[in-house]
Amino acid sequence: MKRLVAALLVSAAPAQAEFVLQLPPGAVETYGKPETTLPAEVPVGPAIDGTVKKTPAPDTIRRTVWRSGAEQSVRNVTRKIAKQLERHGYRVIFDCVVSSCGGFDFRFGIDVVPEPMMRVDLRDYRFITAVQAMSENPGYATFLISRSPDAVFIQLTEYRAGAAASELEESTEAESAAPEPPFKLVLDGLEFTSGGADIEADPNGSVAQLAQMLAADEGLTVLLVGHSDMSGSFGANMSISKARAMAVRATLINDHGIDGSRLTAHGAGFLVPRAGNDTAAGREKNRRVEAVFSR
């Protein structure tokens, strides 16, 4: 079975031990980096009156997100993670599901990697916080698990007790020297039929530029994400945003010879605006397709 790993450093032991997190087969990392601006506090209770109960935590923080296939359920993935935590000396101190978390208020009261690297379905997510059980200066790990129509997303946030500042700096320097996907390209300028998904024009050559990047690096895969403005219903916008992403995918395959197995298309509707929807210019900016790269 293919395994991806995440290191949770157990700082209480004389030599730091490593907890190897076993993820669902086929899981792909969509995000991973040290975080220097996140608050050093972890959720330990639900959102009440719009506020999530939190406790102080170590300030050496790293977030990692994985995307796996839809055959996994949020419940099953969470259960497997909880068992692994227990076996490696972590104690779950908070575990909630949607309504018991506080629903919308909890989701927007915690720090979440932005779409499309991490997706949260407000009707189907789970959150757990675990602490190192046998430590005077414990580290913490939190997991946010949720679904999209065809994938499960897992966000791990590590709060590493006793990790040296130089360790974080070296990690950051290494990433700067040799940047790795994911990175994002907005296919600006694409024009679609009014209310439809057919590409009418690509004045900036955005799709051709994307095709050139893929041809130059055959190790890249792309998640194409369609976005809409707020005109119309939620369901209609989800549908048309995905249809437009699918249109870009079809163009890459049919006109540029890109292998379809490297391309996945999704729709985010109006959930991730990049401008206000109260002006025509803002709505135009929000109607877009983005390419998110990974290996």
Image: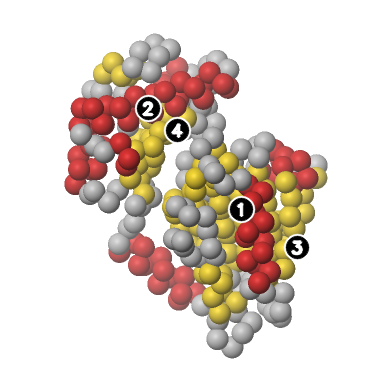
Which residue is denoted by mark 2 in the rendering? 246
Front tag of 3 and 2: 2
Front tag of 1 and 4: 1
Q: Residue furthest bottom?
A: 14
Which residue is denoted by mark 3 in the rendering? 93
Residue 108 position (above or below residue 66): above
Mark toward the start of the polypeptide (1 vs 4): 1
Which residue is denoted by mark 4 in the rendering? 266
* SS under mark 1: helix
Disc 4 residue type?
His
Q: Residue furthest top?
A: 194
Do labels 4 and 2 touch, CB within 8 Å? no
Percent x, y of residue 242: 44, 27
At horizontal 46% and vertical 70% (from top left) the residue drawn is: 168
Which residue is denoted by mark 1 in the rendering? 77
* SS under mark 4: strand
Mark toward the start of the polypeptide (3 vs 2): 3
Mark toward the start of the polypeptide (4 vs 2): 2
CA distance separating discs 2 and 1: 29 Å
Image quarter of residue 43: bottom right
At horizontal 51% and vertical 25% (from top left) the residue drawn is: 238
CA distance separating discs 1 and 4: 22 Å
Mark toward the start of the polypeptide (2 vs 1): 1
Residue 9 position (above or below residue 295): below
Q: Residues within 10 Å of mark 4 (few under 14, many from 20)?
A: many
